[in-house]
Image: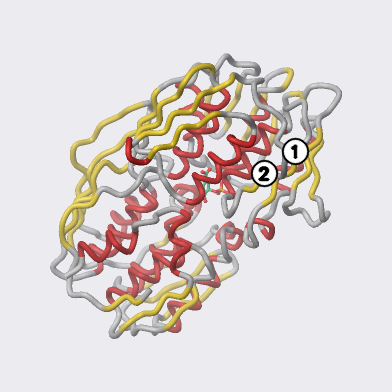
Amino acid sequence: MIIDSVSSIFGQIKVPGDKSISHRAVMFGALAKGTTVIENFLESADCLSTIRCFSNLGISVENDPQKGHVLVHGNGLNGLHAPANSLDVGNSGTTMRLIAGILCGQPFDSILTGDASIVRRPMNRIIQPLTQMGGNINSQLENGCAPLLIKKTNSSLHGICYHSPVASAQVKSCILLAGMYAEGKTSVIEPYISRNHTELMLRQFGAEITCENTTVTITPNPILTACKIQVPGDISSAAYFIAAAAILPNSELVIEEVGVNPTRDGILKVCEKMGVNYQLEEVNQEGGEVFCNIRVHSSKMHGCVIEGEMIPTLIDELPVIAVMACFAEGETIIRDAKELKVKESNRIDAVVNFLSEMGADISATEDGMKIVGGSSLHGITMQSQKDHRIAMSAAVAGLAAKGSTNILDADCVTISYPSFFQDLSRLCH
Ligand code: S3P
């Protein structure tokens, strides 16, 4: 994909549905009684992997993109069937980690596998707590990674109180989902609050979940009842447009119906810190999820420090925040973000490599990066490493760089945002 420099970005855009919420709507719909209707479901490779896995577990899912909604015909908490083959999650960490929690509570064996990236990502973070709960789950190659072998156990799982060493919604959700099949309550305590879509949506389906500070507790054996899920626009996809509008001169964008759940809105807090001129308009709420339109103008930005409890609220946006920091005055420091190393690629190395090659003053640190804004960027040929968020961040940098930027393996954007490049080119001038 060739990205040429543009002078501004202008207009209105409705980004596709939220990836985290789309995954969960299919999963919880599958475990509920009745038909769950998902509006604005994200038709991307990752979410289609979740549908495929549940189809292989005997759940009927009607996905007709023409009709604009997905129907999940749930079979109840104990209504999944043994899959005929290994379950393939593709590139999707959310699919693998959340389904693992569900599968540990099933009376059948299963194998979870996926693509070259997912089989390198750490799974001990779920293997350990699930084992503590009495689950029988192992890394097939004994390297702490997928493929994961999950075996049925003679006795049911038991609830635990788990102190998670990482603030990860995938780990938290995995344990809570296993907790639905356990005897006794299950609690997860996180170092910082991670995205809470599981808590909000499971409650909508009828589960009993309490949250106190960074502790979430689930009562087992809930009766989940089908419902209608309205998926808001994905703030992680909106982030590329927010960044492009802030960076490029004479720009103004309205990004419509974006989910701004406070456990996800760190990018907006960073915009505030950096002096980005933006407004939230038409704020609404459905199913506990807040959404609104975001209006962004070209801005004179300054650097800032991004750390601590903010990190889980913007973890997926850090690559594009690094791009914004290249166009801000002064220094931006990102710390406490080691998790970036174990995403779809090592996102600290990936970002530092392509931005420094483009001429930015950026260096990797042990748990983040340091960027000094103000150097002018030039186009390069870069390898996305098949990481969708790296490809889209490079595209934003490319719009503001001199010359052309060639993104290799750019089709990886299908993971979260299949029409990204078309949408971007429509708005650029
Ligand atoms: C996600 C949680 C985050 C995020 C990922 C989606 C989720 O991962 O990076 O893209 O849907 O729960 P971690 O929980 O591993 O931080």
Observer-nearest residue: 221 or 192? 221
Residue under circle 1?
A: 110
Residue at the limit of the structure toward the top, as seen here: 223
Residue under circle 2?
A: 87
The answer to whether residue 191 is visible is: no
Q: Amino acid at mark 2?
A: Leu
Q: Amino acid at mark 1?
A: Ser
Observer-nearest residue: 36 or 10? 36
Q: Quadrant of the N terminus?
A: bottom left
**Badge number at residue 165:** none
Observer-nearest residue: 302 or 376? 376
CB contact under 8 Å: marks 1 and 2: yes
Residue at the limit of the structure toward the left, as seen here: 250
Sort mark 2 into few (<14), some (14-19) or many (20+) by Cα contacts within 10 Å: many
Relative to 300, does residue 26 appear above or below in the rendering?
Answer: above
Q: Position of residue 81 (x, y in %)?
A: 69, 27
